[in-house]
Amino acid sequence: MPTTAIVAHQGTTTDTYFIAAKDKPYVLRLDSNRAGHVSTTTYDSFGAPVTMQLPTEDRIVSMKDFQTKVTTLPR
């Protein structure tokens, strides 16, 4: 499917949004580069029902605990 790329850049961060060029202008893909950490996210099935289930209590971490864990990871 043809797309139009829109690039947002600031400092060491670049996001490239690939927007459908025909029909509805859905975001189909996002390529991100955050100071060399690269990721790609694709989007599809627009309008299709989605089933979501929350994690059980034993799988939930508070934001404070999460931040502590990720800032103490070895680099």
Image (tube, grey):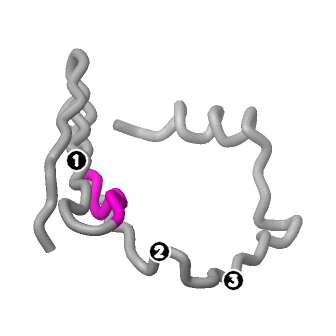
Give the numbered dot on residue 46.
Answer: 2
Q: Position of residue 5 (x, y in %)?
A: 15, 47
Q: Left or right of 57: which side holds 16?
A: left
Q: Secondary structure at mark 3?
A: loop
Q: Residue at x 11, y 67 (%)?
A: 2
Closest to the observer: 55 or 47?
Answer: 47
In-front residue for pair 34/27: 27
How far apart in space, not on screen, are marks 3 and 1 (Cα)? 28 Å
- The picture places residue 74, in percent across and down from the top left corner, at 41, 39
Q: Nearer the viewer, mark 2 or mark 3?
A: 2
**Residue extending furthest left?**
2
Residue 51 falls left or right of residue 11: right
Q: Position of residue 16 (x, y in %)?
A: 21, 43
Relative placement, left or right, of 59 versus 75 is: right
Q: Secondary structure at mark 2?
A: loop
**Secondary structure under badge 1?**
strand
The residue drawn where x is 21% and y is 66% is 22
Furthest-right residue in view? Answer: 57
Label 3 belongs to which residue? 51
Mark closest to the chain's N terminus, 2 or 3: 2
The residue lying toward the viewer, choosing from 13 and 29, is 29
Q: Magenta span covers which residues?
A: 24-31
Q: Which x, y percent locates residue 36?
A: 18, 36
